[in-house]
Image (cartoon, grey):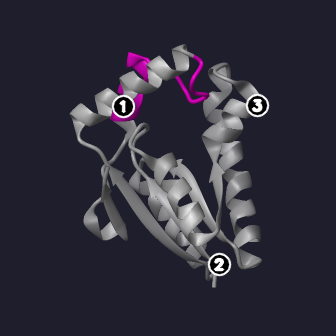
């Protein structure tokens, strides 16, 4: 039986790196909103960014079911920053009898800031195709992110 592995954590917490590990270990397909957004829009989605993200989520939820129903594992490398998002995912997969596991990538504040600085330098040096995280974006995500409780998460990873 296939499984959906759900990555939860702040940006720069190590979700994508961990998702790649699961992909290899579990022969899984990784679905990433950032990968699609950056591939289509680069750094320039503008004021429609959130709208596009929601559309991609809808598509990737449907695609994850299709993949899982063929017997292939899926990794959702999204973030799941709010309890509402996590609860929705649980209901979505439970109602379709698809097994899932939540992974939380916990990162301490000093390490988080170091990773943001490194990511930004890599983006500026054209060594990374991820999002540049300016102070406003970091503050936005910090204000949105809701740290999950232990009972919401199957695997707690200190990254």
From where the camera sits, is residue 87 visible?
yes
Residues under labels 2 and 3: Cα distance?
30 Å
Magenta residues (range): 126-142
Residues under labels 2 and 1: Cα distance?
37 Å
On whether residue 55 falls in the magenta region, the answer is no
- What secondary structure is found at the residue carrying circle 3? helix
**Mark closer to the observer (2, 1):** 1
- Is 85 left, or right, of 3 in this rendering? left
- What secondary structure is found at the residue carrying circle 2? loop
| Tally of numbered discs | 3
Chain-order first, disc 2 or disc 1? 2
Picture coordinates of residue 140 (x, y %)? 40, 28
Q: Quadrant of residue 127?
A: top right
Chain-order first, disc 3 or disc 1? 3
Depth check: give the residue in front, 28 or 139: 28
From where the camera sits, is residue 133 visible?
no
Q: Quadrant of residue 121?
A: top left
**Mark closer to the observer (3, 1):** 1
């Amino acid at each position: 039986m296939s499984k959906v592995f759900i990555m939860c954590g702040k940006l720069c917490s190590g979700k994508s790196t961990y998702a790649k590990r699961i992909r290899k270990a579990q022969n899984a397909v990784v679905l990433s909103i950032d990968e699609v957004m950056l591939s289509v829009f680069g750094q320039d989605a503008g004021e429609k960014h959130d709208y596009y993200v929601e559309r991609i989520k809808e598509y990737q939820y449907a695609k994850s079911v299709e993949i899982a129903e063929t017997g292939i594992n899926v990794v959702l490398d999204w973030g799941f920053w709010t309890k509402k998002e996590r609860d929705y995912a649980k209901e979505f997969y439970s109602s379709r009898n698809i097994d899932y596991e939540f992974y939380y990538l916990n990162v301490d504040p000093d390490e988080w800031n170091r990773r943001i600085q490194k990511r930004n330098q890599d983006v500026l040096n054209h060594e990374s195709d991820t999002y540049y995280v300016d102070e406003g974006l970091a503050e936005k995500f910090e204000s949105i992110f809701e740290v999950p409780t232990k009972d919401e998460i199957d695997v707690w990873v200190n990254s």
